């Protein structure tokens, strides 16, 4: 086996593990002979689905990952509606009629260069993000002399068990590269009390912070959770999978996610 760094082409491959924790850029173990397809698909409430299809290259080749043109990409919404997605750019495909709705299950089929990949995802019911709480941090990044702050997403987890979340944090229009996920294994049915920990992303007085919250289904949470195991840092240092767990069948990397989407911005005072 050779290693092929493809993190730069995956929306998710600066991933996260655990409860509001984060991870570094990862390196995937890929066979040096066989190229891999990467599918990144998302659909959000009242928005069209967008799917990107990419192909990896051999370990010995430059990291210039080609977009896959001319693929046959179709989507169904579980209510009898199916459509072929339109290629709106090289390797980028978009629905024209089907949009996202909470509670619906979406099925994706991608046919590319003689290969067929399928995926299914369900959009959870939205959990309302009501605000952001700011608190002084007890630690500072190396070399920092300013007081640092951490943020707490304000929401109440539903009583029903099994909710999962993804958070994207931006400071002064700079996006935090790691991706943060959480579930309700701890704190089910309670107001959130866990901060977003980003020790290498300094937040100080006067910063403008934006927090985006996605409600995701379990397979998408499992995908991000597994990224930590890919690095060999999983619970108990157990068996390391070759690639992250994915809800895409047929041998492709990546994910297909139907999720809700909310965003709140504040100034740290």
Image: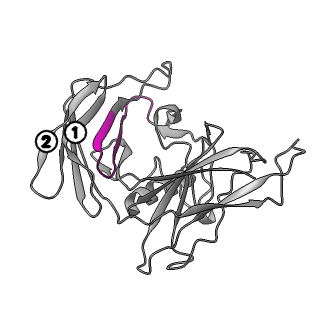
Mark sitting on residue 188: none
Q: Position of residue 55 (x, y in %)?
A: 36, 29
Give the vertical position of 207 relative to 66 (above or below): below
Q: Position of residue 252 (x, y in %)?
A: 33, 41
Residue 151 occupies which quadrant of the picture? bottom right
Left or right: 215 in relation to 150? left
Direction left: furthest residue = 80
The residue depicted at 47 percent of the width and 39 percent of the height is 11
Q: Position of residue 138 (x, y in %)?
A: 83, 60
The residue depicted at 57 percent of the width and 57 percent of the height is 17
Q: Position of residue 130 (x, y in %)?
A: 53, 64
Coloring basis for residues: one colour
Q: Is residue 80 one of those drawn in magenta?
A: no
Front residue of 254/62: it is: 254
Q: Could one spot residue 126 in this view of the protein?
A: yes
Graded by Cα atoms within 10 Å as few (under 14), some (14 to 19) or many (20 or more), the crowding at tag 1 reads: many
Q: Could one spot residue 19 in this view of the protein?
A: no
The residue depicted at 9 percent of the width and 55 percent of the height is 80
How many callouts does the rendering have? Answer: 2
* Contact, mark 1 vs mark 2 (Cβ under 8 Å): yes
Give the vertical position of 195 relative to 185 (above or below): above
In the image, the segment drawn in magenta is: 31-52
Q: Is residue 51 one of those drawn in magenta?
A: yes
Give the vertical position of 216 relative to 184 (above or below): above
Disc 1 from disc 2: Cα separation: 7 Å
Residue holding disc 2? 83
The residue depicted at 62 percent of the width and 43 percent of the height is 176
Circle 1: element type: strand
Question: Could you tell which of marks 1 and 2 lies nearer the N-terminus?
Answer: 2
Residue holding disc 1? 95
Circle 2: element type: strand
């Amino acid at each position: 086996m050779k290693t092929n760094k493809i993190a730069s082409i995956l929306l998710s491959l600066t991933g996260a593990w655990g409860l509001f924790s984060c991870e570094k850029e990862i390196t995937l173990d890929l066979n040096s002979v066989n190229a891999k397809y990467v599918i990144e698909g998302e659909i959000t409430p009242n928005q069209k689905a967008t799917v990107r299809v990419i192909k990896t290259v051999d370990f010995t080749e430059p990291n210039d990952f080609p977009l896959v043109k001319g693929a046959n990409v179709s989507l169904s919404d579980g209510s009898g509606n199916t459509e072929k997605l339109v290629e709106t750019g090289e390797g980028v495909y978009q629905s024209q009629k089907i949009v996202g709705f909470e509670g619906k299950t979406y099925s994706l089929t991608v046919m590319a260069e003689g290969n067929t990949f399928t995926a299914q995802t369900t959009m959870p019911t939205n959990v309302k993000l009501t605000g952001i709480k700011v608190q002084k941090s007890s630690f500072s990044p190396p070399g920092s002399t300013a007081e640092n702050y951490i943020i707490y997403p304000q929401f109440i987890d539903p009583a029903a068990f099994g909710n999962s979340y993804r958070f994207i944090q931006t400071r002064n229009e700079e996006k935090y590269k790691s991706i943060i996920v959480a579930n309700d294994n701890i704190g089910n049915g309670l107001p959130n009390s866990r901060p977003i920990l980003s020790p290498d992303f300094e937040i100080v007085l006067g910063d403008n912070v934006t927090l985006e919250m996605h409600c995701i289904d379990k397979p998408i949470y499992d995908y991000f959770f597994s990224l930590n195991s890919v690095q060999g840092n999983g619970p108990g240092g157990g068996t390391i999978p070759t690639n992250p767990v994915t809800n895409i069948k047929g041998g492709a990397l990546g994910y297909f996610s139907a999720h809700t989407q909310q965003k709140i911005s504040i100034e740290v005072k």
